[in-house]
Amino acid sequence: MDADSLLLSLELASGSGQGLSPDRRASLLTSLMLVKRDYRFARVLFWGRILGLVADYYIAQGLSEDQLAPRKTLYRRSGAQGDVDVVGSLNCTEWSLLPPATEEMATQTAVVSGRFMGDPSHEYEHTEIQKVNEGEKVFDEEVVVQIKEETRLVSIIDQIDKAVAIIPRGALFKTPFGVTHVNRTFEGLPLSEIRKLSSYFHFREAIDLKNKTLLEKADLNPSLDFMDSLEYDIPKGSWSIQMERGNALVVLRSLLWPGLTFYHAPRSKNYGYIYVGTGEKNMDLPFML
Amino acid sequence: MGEPPPNPDPSSQSRRSSQASERARSRDSSQPLLSIPEDGVPRPTQRGSRSSQSSQGSQDLQSTGLPQWPLRSSLIPENQGEEGMEYNQSMSLGYQPGFPFEFSPQGYLDENRMMQQFPQGEGLLEQLDTAFQDSGAGLLGQFNMFPQEDQPFGQTIQHGPYLRDDPTLHAGCSDLGFMPFVGEVPDPQPRELAVQNAKAYLLQTSVNCNLSLYEHLVNLLTKILNQRPEDPLSILETLNRNTQWEWFHPKLDTLRDDPEMQPTYEMAEKQKALFSRGGEGEQEMEEEVNDSPVPNIMETAFYFEQAGVGLSSDESFRIFLALRQLVEQQPIHTCRFWGKILGLSRSYLVAEVEFREGEEEGEEEEVEEMMEGGEVLEAHGEEEGEEDEEKVVDAVPKPQWKPPPVIPKEESRTGTNKYLYFVCNEPGRPWTRLPHVTPAQIVSARKIKKFFTGFLDTPVISYPPFPGNEANYLRAQIARISAATHISPLGFYQFGEEEGDEEEEGGAGRDSFEENPDFEGIPVLELVDSMANWVHHTQHILPQGRCTWVNPMQKTEEEEELGEEEEKADEGMEEVEQEVGPPLLTPLSEDAEIMHLSPWTTRLSCSLSPQYSVAVVRSNLWPGAYAYAVGKKFENLYIGWGHKYSPENFNPSLPAPIQQEYPSGPEIMEMSDPTVEEEQALKAAQEQALAAAEEEEEDEEDEEDEDLED
């Protein structure tokens, strides 16, 4: 959700039950403003909160002018029990920049499962059996691989972004130069479109778009339809669309990454998504539908 | 002046089309001319200057090029005359820097429509016609596009430095609404012509609709000028599309309802009904203040908000009103907002209530009787079927499988059915009561994991098959969540002094408690530090599915009747051990860990102000379950999907192993069927035997015949 409209957005996204306490809201408002200034972001999004056992992570993302360029992710850890005494460290308004996610990180952290601890320097141990060549013989050795929680955090955020960060159709448009801009004349989705999955796009570079047949592409508007829509998500039915507040708000919740809530007030410019959850994928989804 | 010679249409057309482009060019090039001062010629409008200059071109532009406008300006006074005047009167170029389209388009439109009539016949302004010819010739000569021989074409009567000032001509032009311009230099005829043609082109209506490009551009630019957005160039395309769209989708007038918003308005109406107080009067207000069982939702919501949990405050207020509505409709003794369970299409708001003493839950009993009757009927049906078969062929062996005894569900107000639950989808919608939960449903619910759809009568399709529909599944999950996550600070509840012996309950422990009037409250920091300061105040559910254990081997009366036939089966059953769970009011520190993770996480709601903070406890086993406590207040809440957390993936139950067929015994012996070869061999052998028998008979007959013959 946009940091500029943080309060309203939190109010609208509160249907999932998780929000922010007033003190956190206040601190976020000021700190996100400073982050915007310091990092020279065009737009700062409050991405959400990952609940750990000991402490929680608050994540923010910054965007440059081109909306689809890789986003910078910052995190802040807070809520640890021990913070009662130590006020200045890691708890207040210090945002740390996370490294960009790489494929290697993804493979590394795929073996780690379970809850986040809440300590970015915590290391998960994973024993692997590797073949070690010693001279001419090949041994199977058990190697203990240490994976830092920060790496895991980075890759989880990246996975969630690629999988379930969404945007309503028409909110961004692409100019012929290739740059993606915020559409200032976006007036909101009409009521006839809000229940359709095809009105929402993944907020990332298009992957499936090239595979579409020419016949399908003929109906698309290249300045608006340049991202993948939710229609073809696998597994089918991994999104729950609901109307809340007496039909005045449409809320999409992801079932694949439970905790991701997208809200949009139809016919208005308010939209956004927030992730508040444990940072674990719901691998049981096919059984649960 | 005489009548101008009629224009040969094609030539004029072609000239006009070329003039249009030239006009456009001349229009562009005429922009810088605005600043060029005209010598001694009073010009009320700039158009005069340009028109005069373009007509000037007719004179001596054959040799001079475009940029020599200033030269021509000196010649302007000479050429002033009818031509120029006509142009000025007839052309309203409106090229003023402010683009005041308010008045000029009108003139343009009229005039251009008239111009469009030219191809069709005589125009209204034949003077324009002659002027066209003139300027056409001039412009063409200027750009060297047409040979000189065009000159003779409808050669203008008015050319040359001496143009008569004919009042009739003025009058003719005045109905166009232009000021008759006197003293204007009639120069820019070619440019005027070009402009007119361009405008005519722009005013063509599109094939698909009645909109012409000209009108659309007018709308677009008016919109931009009115709204004055920042950086309009970057949003030009969007504005363009929006303007087009608006043309075809005008705002509905006030008399019509917006069809799309209907469902929203209906919901709003329903919620508005919540806000009305039923029945005025001070008495009722006093009663409500004193006796109402409706809880203080707003206070709970406030405290949970400190923890970052819960719905927004206006939603909480609506829930409060909805609970009040529920209290008015049902005979409720205590009521609590249990939480919200999210579903696929709709969500559930759950209220936990207790009916007043003595209120019968009539509906429930009827449903139960029907179910039990059904079971008995089924049992009879099986036996009858068996008997029929017995009469027919061989004695079909009776199945030796006996369904496991149904564990009776708990009574209302005890154990898992201690509270009644009502659900609704949204505040304003009616509340529905959930049925009581049976142990079988709880046992089944532990084995499956399904999302709720939001509709209570959806069947739950799963393996093992869930005995019930979504309402039952929901109730079972609510029971499990309540049993696992309802906690309170140590000492808030205590066991009453009138409790009987533990042995009476079959070893299950006490199952009721009461509030401790002397509860002092535990400091928030202590609550956060140690889990021993919190206790469960709901009973743990045994693996059997109940809170108090029941020996399933105890036969009820019904079973004893059928028991004689099935005694053989009983021998195979094992002794069932009594199941024991942790007693009531066990502290949380005794809770089992999930894979080395503590099942509870505690937080202080705000570390910056610990003196006013609230202690918050979050369950790791049931994500979405929260409890807060501060001072003497505490509350539990659940907002989530309604599923348990498991670190491993969900493993669905495997199907039961294939059942054994009837065991082989002396009565039944399973033999394999003969194969085809064997059958054929048998058949061949039989045929052989038959053939052999026939031969023998024939032989015998032959012998007999022989005997006879002999």
Image (cartoon, rainbow, N blue to C red):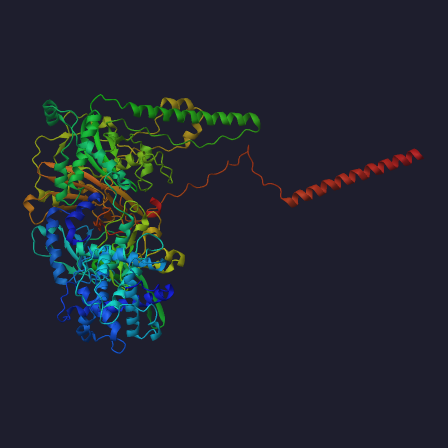
| Foreground pick, B321 / B674 | B321
Q: Quadrant of the C terminus of chain B?
A: top right
Percent position (x, y) of residue A97?
17, 61
Residue A47 at least partly seen: yes
Q: Is residue B585 visible?
A: no
Quarter of the image with the N terminus of chain B in it? bottom left
**Residue in front for this viewpoint, A104 or A184:** A184
Which residue extends farthest right? B710
Could you say which is closer to the camera, residue B306 or residue B509? Answer: B306
Question: How many marks are shown on the rendered structure?
Answer: 0
Image quadrant where residue B114 sits: bottom left
Measured as percent of width and height from the top left, residue A105 is found at 26, 62
B633 on left or right of B364: left
Position of residue A267 measured from the top left corner of the image (x, y, whole percent):
24, 47
Residue B160 figure quarter? bottom left
Does residue B173 lie above or below B563 as drawn?
Answer: below
Q: Nearer the viewer, residue B531 or B446?
A: B446
Residue at the left extreme of this rendering: B611
Instruction: Residue B333: name its quadrant.
Output: top left
Percent coordinates x, y for residue B92 in the rendering: 22, 60
